Image: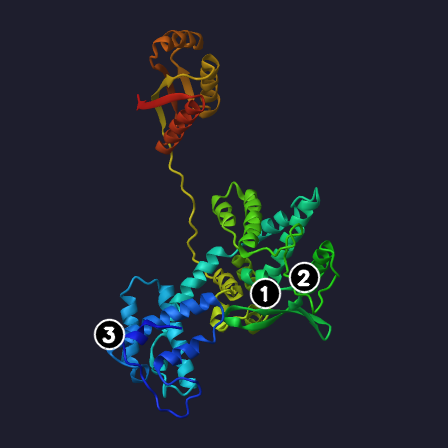
Amino acid sequence: MILPLERVVNISKTADLECQIDADNDIAAVRSWLSRYSKQTTLRAYKKEAERFLLWCTYERGLYLRQLKVSDFETYFSFLREKPLSKSSLVMAVHVIGSLISYLVNANYLKANPMKLLKTSQLFSQESQERQYRVWARMLEQDEWLAVQNALTCLPEGNVQQIDYKLKTQFLFSLLYLLGLRIHEVANHSWNAFRQLNGQWWFMAMGKGDKLGHIPVNDQLLSMIKIYRLHLGKTPLPLTNETEYLIISKRTKKPLGIRQLFSLVKAVGKIAAEQFKDNPDKYQKLLSLSPHWLRHLSASHQDKAGINGTMIQANHRHGSFSTTQIYLHSEDDRRFNEMQKLRMEVEPKMVVPQESSVKAELKITLTGKAVSEDYELERFISVLEQHILRDLAWNRTEDITKLMERYRKIKIFKKPLEIVYEIEGKFSEERMDYIKRGVIREAEIRLFECGVDYQEL
């Protein structure tokens, strides 16, 4: 790593003979810490935070790492709060700097860790709560999850291509839900990640931060593995020397990338959404379905199935149990059910205001030119009288025959056609607005421009 500080500042030297890393200055010490991270996205993020921190130490405080005290860290994080950083970015910065300092203390490069005396827990707690509520918004409800599974079951299988698409999509969903894998873990692992130990099947997952974990493979997933592998022309169960990626194109034999796997999930979400056309919230939610939602759902359903929280943490390979807690909702369900015991003696009843009978004049003005003018006008009047005004007493002030004759004359000169109704009934202002919208909608369907005037008599 080449930091800009190397060219402009004196580098702190340490004479501590007990230092366990090959570093005699701050730059070398940070390099040693960064060398632990091989994943490029993590490395870039951590390097950026380290550079910003060291530049601040030099230009704002004029201090080396070994000279920093609690007040310096408090000032630095206050400095970050003044910048256009999101709360998650601020939490990230605290986490990264904390990791760096802890590493250097453990390596005996630094004598103490001032960050242990900081009150950062409140910041992390707030971020954790906000993250929990974001997860809740994405958590599939039971009917939504059933719709997704129904979409998977009903994928077509009329030819070889459709069968291949259906089986690999179902296998992808089983990995995301039954194992709780991240989408990049599905894309980057090969068949030899499945291992049999003492008659039990496990999935050896290399996750975030290169953390290795092992996840139990249940009987249903094992059955899905056999079906998908037989479809690919493989042995029913994985072999330890198989290095081929899990999901490949049967035509090209190339592994599917993250974007392609993501598209498979989105396609199923779109199909499932069709079951909720009459519910805009659920419809839009399923259109937003992403692979990580299934990982959330897996943790939540494990919790509801009574699986211990520490086991769920191990299955999802969370570094902290506080992360796992974000996905656990069974206690909230119990809390919700217990609160139903709280009652008041007051029982509210719906009170509907009495509507008085009203006499009014409804004047409709049509302009424009329909495709089939006479027919469309007759149809418009029919819908208006049989549906829109059906609950009211009404009287059209002009006979339909005379109205049509007048329309045929005035349309030549492109004059507006005025239709007047005398109406009577019990209706509110909301009811009148409904009638107006109905009239205008029917007119627009028939390519008329429409004006509606209402006046009580």
Residue type, numbered disc 2: Leu
Residue 96 image position (x, y, % from top left): 40, 73
Return the x and y of residue 302 as percentages of the image width and height.
59, 65
The answer to which quarter of the image holds residue 345 is bottom left
Read off the residue under disc 3.
60
Residue 281: x and y, percent? 47, 47
Write down the residue under mark 2. Answer: 221
Asked if labels 2 and 3 touch by Cβ distance under 8 angstroms, the answer is no
Sort mark 2 into few (<14), some (14-19) or many (20+) by Cα contacts within 10 Å: some
Residue visible at 32% across and 63% down?
85
Q: Earlier in the sequence, mark 1 or mark 3?
A: 3
Quarter of the figure that contains the C terminus: top left
Q: Find disc 1 in the rendering and name its residue.
A: 302
Q: Residue at x 54, y 61 (%)?
A: 184
Crowding at dot 1, Cα within 10 Å, few <14 / some 14-19 / many 20+, comes out as: some
> As displayed, is residue 97 above or below residue 256?
below
Q: Amino acid at mark 1?
A: Gln
Task: Decide which of tag 1 and tag 2 comes sooner along the chain.
Answer: 2
Q: CA distance from mark 1 to mark 2?
A: 15 Å
